[in-house]
Image (spheres, rainbow, N blue to C red):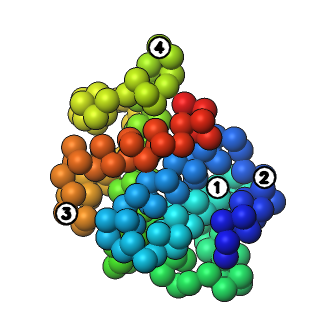
């Protein structure tokens, strides 16, 4: 599946602007992480990030179907099992084991993207360019700030990816800053 095909699929799923930005942020993070772990699979990693929550709104009335619905759709389109399992594995309740670097990266990066977005939105100019790694780390420790960004899941960057938290924050922040116009942040 090409990136254009993926974006067309996303369009057909009535993805909201905010979810689309979340998908693009994760795509950027995954592409950067792939260069570190599996440079030959950058596009695959990117696709996992881009599609992981693509059915979020489509399944809003039946959240139990997320992310199974998008996984099924991708399967029918011939997308690899590795990508599909990474997408299924990003939601704990599926019970799909995160046994690839791709799956582990998506799991940790997903929540870090949320935390960094929240860090940008509290800046006076609401820009990622005003966010520093130090501020992300400080907000990481601030209870109640962006509570939807699961800290226990973010910190798996250390145990599962062997990347210290400060380095992981830097990788994710810089990845998102690299596409700030698309993220409107
Ligand atoms: Fe997500």
Q: Residue 35: x and y, percent?
A: 37, 65
Asked if residue 150 shows in the view, the reply is yes
Does the residue tagged 1 have its C-beta within 8 Å of any atom of ligand 1?
yes
Which badge, 2 or 4, is on the more N-terminal residue? 2
The residue tagged 3 is 162
| Helix, strand or loop status at disc 1 | loop
The residue tagged 2 is 14
Distance from Cα at disc 4 to Cα at disc 1 = 29 Å
Location of the N terminus by quadrant is bottom right
> On the picture, is 95 further left or further right than 47?
left
How busy is the neighbourhood of tag 3: few (under 14 within 10 Å), some, or many (20 plus)? few
Distance from Cα at disc 3 to Cα at disc 1 = 29 Å
Q: Kindly report which numbered mark, 2 or 1, lies closer to the viewer in this rendering.
A: 2
The residue tagged 4 is 124
> On the picture, is 148 further left or further right than 43?
left
Distance from Cα at disc 3 to Cα at disc 4 = 34 Å
Which badge, 4 or 1, is on the more N-terminal residue? 1
Residue at the spot 39% in from the left edge and 42% down from the top edge: 174
**What numbered label is drawn on residue 113?**
none
Do tag 4 and tag 1 residues touch (Cβ < 8 Å)? no
Rendered position, 78 above or below 163: below
Asked if residue 61 shows in the view, the reply is no
């Amino acid at each position: 599946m090409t990136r254009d095909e993926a974006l067309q699929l996303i369009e057909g799923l009535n993805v909201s602007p905010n979810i689309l930005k979340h998908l693009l942020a994760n795509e950027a993070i995954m592409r950067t992480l792939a260069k570190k772990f599996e440079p030959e699979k950058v596009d695959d990693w990117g696709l996992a990030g881009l599609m992981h929550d693509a059915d979020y709104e489509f399944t809003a009335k039946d959240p139990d179907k997320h992310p199974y619905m998008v996984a099924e759709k991708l399967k029918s389109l011939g997308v690899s099992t590795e990508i599909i399992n990474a997408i299924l594995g990003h939601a704990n309740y599926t019970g799909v084991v995160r046994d690839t670097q791709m799956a582990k990266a998506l799991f940790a990066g997903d929540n870090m993207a949320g935390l960094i977005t929240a860090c940008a939105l509290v800046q006076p100019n609401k820009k990622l360019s005003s966010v520093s790694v130090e501020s992300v780390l400080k907000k990481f420790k601030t209870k109640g700030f962006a509570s939807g960004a699961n800290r226990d899941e973010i910190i798996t960057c250390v145990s599962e990816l062997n990347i210290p938290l400060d380095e992981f924050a830097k990788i994710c922040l810089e990845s998102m800053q690299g596409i700030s116009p698309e993220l409107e942040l």
